[in-house]
Image (cartoon, grey):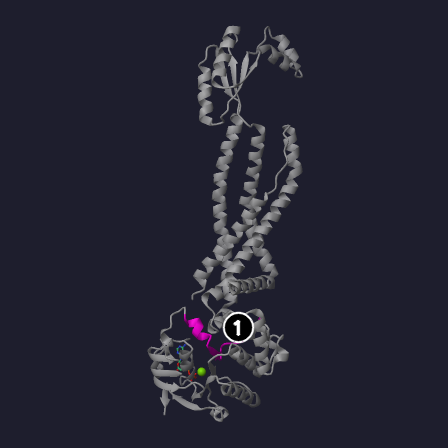
Amino acid sequence: MISFERVSKRYLSGRAAVENISFRATAGDFVLLSGHSGAGKSTLLNLLAVIEHPTEGAIRVNGEDVTRLARRALPYYRRTLGLILQDQKLLSDRSVFDNVQLPLAIAGHSRQDAARRAQAALERVGLAARAADMPITLSGGEQQRVAIARAIVAKPLLLLADEPTASLDPAYARDIAELLASFNRAGVTVLVTSHDTALFEPHCTRRLVLDHGRLMQ
Amino acid sequence: MKSWLAQHGQAAARALGRLARAPFGTLLASIVVGVAAVLPAGGWLLLDNIERLADKAAVLPQISVFMAADASADDVAGVQKALRAKVSGVQYVPRKSTLQRIRALEGMGEVLDALPDNPFPDAFIVTPESDDAQALEALKAAFSQLPKVEHVQLDSAWVRRLNAFVTLAQTALWLLAGLLGVALVAVTFNTIRLQILTQQEEVRVSRLLGATTTFIRRPFYWFGTLQGLGGGLVAWALLWLFARALAAPAQELAGLYSLEFALHTLPPQAVLCLLASTAALGWLGAAASLWRNLAD
Ligand SMILES: Nc1ncnc2c1ncn2[C@@H]1O[C@H](COP(=O)(O)OP(=O)(O)O)[C@@H](O)[C@H]1O
Ligand SMILES: [Mg+2]
């Protein structure tokens, strides 16, 4: 389903953030991407989400090289992804419910349909009762669960999570890991970056380790 | 089609929400737009009223033809025949009746008594079919050539002057409207720029969630258009207040010239035109701002 072919990314600042990365993952995989801080985990994930463009190489998703997607086609590719990024916060001026509904509004779902799905997604992460609240009134762990609800509400094929448990208490972190695993069991391909390998070890089907931008075998 | 409408509805609702979330700023921007729009709209209204007045004052211009003092009855008959040959509306005003009419005026009796003779000449009032300025001048020249005609006067000169003034003022008004239109676009450009800055996070997140450029831009277009429309409504309200405040003094002034006159407010088509223009200019300002401030 996913294949990286000799992918390198050099930021303008110089040294390669990731270098000559090649790997494959099949549909239904739970891929854990680990490595030290600065190893290139976020870069790799951003390349897959076409937030960054590789300096070299191709990234195929279901056979199509997503690095060459036309500008017009990119939004439609993004809609097949569920993104949980570190710096992609919830919108602070909208309720939890409206945050979760946003991907559906973007994809052009009707209001009733969007409301029904958003409600279901919030139930799935155990926050249906907080639907009307503003994100600021939620704890860090709860906010992360809302972000997960937003990522899965439009039924993505591929769920990408960048350090989803960073800065969370261990109990919350376990919650999140199990939640992601449950989506994986339901058929969603998952790619998670984390330096807490022990947390995801029991769930993952593939392990990738980055070291200074290179993939370790 | 239905989903397209629904998406526009949602975008409009979002734009309205943003406007409502900052009611003071919205009001302020609408007043700026409204005041800018009230100048050309008010000018148009003023000219419209002047035109109505001019139309009422003289439907067709008149030409007065004065005979020489020593003209005989035959001369007068000859001129009358010559005039009738060119224009059907010819009214003969004998010098005797002019004398009577003036004598009836307060204080004029004594003045006339002091004169040895009737000082007024025989005259004709000619009402031409055409009010074309060149045709009138041609008639005037032709009448002056008739024997024993002393003087020919175009009575409607003031109306023509007024009409010329109105034409000039209309041109100036279009220029003013153009300038203020540019100002309106600039005002909207800036409010949309600020909107884009405050919505930066939402735009970024929406992009990551797969929003198309159209989807992202739509609420900004609505924002600009609605703000322009709000400005148009403010301008309309201001004009209505002005017209109300000026109605009584205008009537009084017209009364002094014994003119029947009621100050007109904006007719429905003009109101529609005003609202459509301010809304369109708001849209244009949003378009310019999006083009400049929101890269895709
Ligand atoms: N936008 C950027 N511009 C320049 N350098 C960057 C940028 N993002 C990341 N880097 C560099 O690329 C390397 C990998 O970073 P990153 O992918 O964030 O690692 P990780 O997520 O594993 O901590 C680091 O050396 C980092 O400083
Ligand atoms: Mg990182």
Is the residue indicated by label 1 positioned so its CB lies within 8 Å of ligand 2? no
- Closer to us: B86 or B64: B86
- Closer to us: A10 or A147: A147
Residue A82 painted magenta: yes
Identify whether B34 is placed above or below A50: above
Residue A88 painted magenta: yes
On the image, the x and y values in percent for residue B289 come to: 46, 59
- Closer to us: B258 or B136: B136
**Would you identify the image quadrant in which residue A115 lies?**
bottom right
Horizontally, residue A74 falls left or right of residue B255, namely left
Residue shown at 50% from the left, 70% from the top: A106
On the image, the x and y values in percent for residue B283 come to: 50, 56
Q: Point out the stretch of residues depicted in magenta.
A: A73-93
Neighbour tally class for label 1: few under 14, some 14-19, many 20 plus, Cα within 10 Å: many
Residue shown at 55% from the left, 73% from the top: A101
Image region (quadrant) for ligand 2:
bottom left
Residue shown at 50% from the left, 53% from the top: B280
Q: Which residue is mark 1?
A: A104
Disc 1, SS = helix
- Closer to us: B135 or B34: B135
